Image (spheres, rainbow, N blue to C red):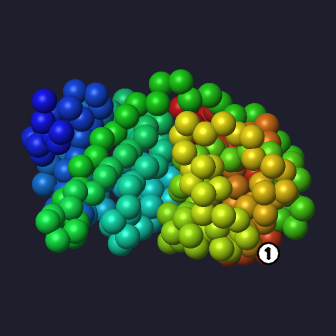
Amino acid sequence: MPDRMTHQQLIKLVAGAAAGVFETDASGRLVRLSGWEEITGQNPSEAQGAGWLEKLHPEDVQRAGEAWKSALDHGIEYNTEFRVKVQDGSYRWYNARGVPEFDGDGNVSAWIGMVLRMAHRMRPTAVAPVSRADPTAVVAIHPAALRAARAMLGWSAEDLAQEAGLSRSTVRRMESDGAKQSTQRSTMQRLMRTLSNARLDLLSENGTVNGVRWLPHEEQRATVVPFPDRANRA
């Protein structure tokens, strides 16, 4: 058995597991997009450039776009959750993941990614705002939310670790999808204060941060706030 899959074998495998598949050149220009038109009604030419963002929920556009730009700029994995406007006009949650391919010189030569339907995403419950200066109500952060925060800020794992006074291995462990949320409270508070000081709002349910967004310019402090209610989340 060969120890490495060919490009076409990888595409075939991804296509068999995902609702949508995308492939781009090194600059991020789409060269293949399947499944997206069936989901959204938007054809590949309309999705080129930033066109695909038009089918995302307005509250998710900036985060998804900036995370993609960060992935392109740094040659890192793209892994972001967002709401997509499907053909019946409602919004559904999807997870988009992309990985870079490298040439013999170590340069990014292409991107391969997939879009996965999140069928079991639960409606979060509202919680009281948590002060930026004392985020004691936060006890955990979802790995995808932490990756999204870092992508929005354009920080590497080392950057975040240094800003928060943590080890790189701690940040990587917290970003792992298989990680158990057993982080010490003092570590979590350092992380929350760091993200809040970087002007991010932390979207929380039951003490767990499940999403992030930029703090509006007119506000003077960051807070942990509830997700939008069911009426806005279809």
At mark 1, the secondary structure is loop
Picture quadrant of residue 149: bottom right
Quadrant of the drawing holding the N terminus: top left
Say which residue appears at 60% left-offset and 57% top-offset. Answer: 169
Task: Give the percent coordinates (x, y) of residue 223.
Answer: 79, 60
Q: Is residue 92 above or below residue 100?
A: above
Residue 231 visible to the viewer: yes
Q: How dense is the environment of label 1, judged by Cα within 10 Å: few (below 14), some, or many (20 and up)?
A: few
- In the image: residue 33, left or right of residue 122: left
Picture quadrant of residue 164: bottom right
Task: Give the percent coordinates (x, y) of residue 197.
Answer: 74, 72
Residue type at mark 1?
A: Gln
Say which residue appears at 55% left-offset and 65% top-offset. Answer: 157
Task: Give the percent coordinates (x, y) of residue 30.
Answer: 18, 57
Say which residue appears at 90% left-offset and 62% top-offset. Answer: 134
- In the image: residue 48, left or right of residue 141: left
Count up the numbered dots.
1
Q: Which residue is mark 1?
A: 220
Say which residue appears at 83% left-offset and 65% top-offset. Answer: 132
Residue 153 visible to the viewer: no
Q: Is residue 164 above or below residue 94?
A: below
Extreme residue toward the top, this view: 120
Q: Is residue 68 above or below residue 234?
A: below
- In the image: residue 221, left or right of residue 71: right
- In the image: residue 93, left or right of residue 139: left
Task: Give the percent coordinates (x, y) of residue 193.
Answer: 78, 66
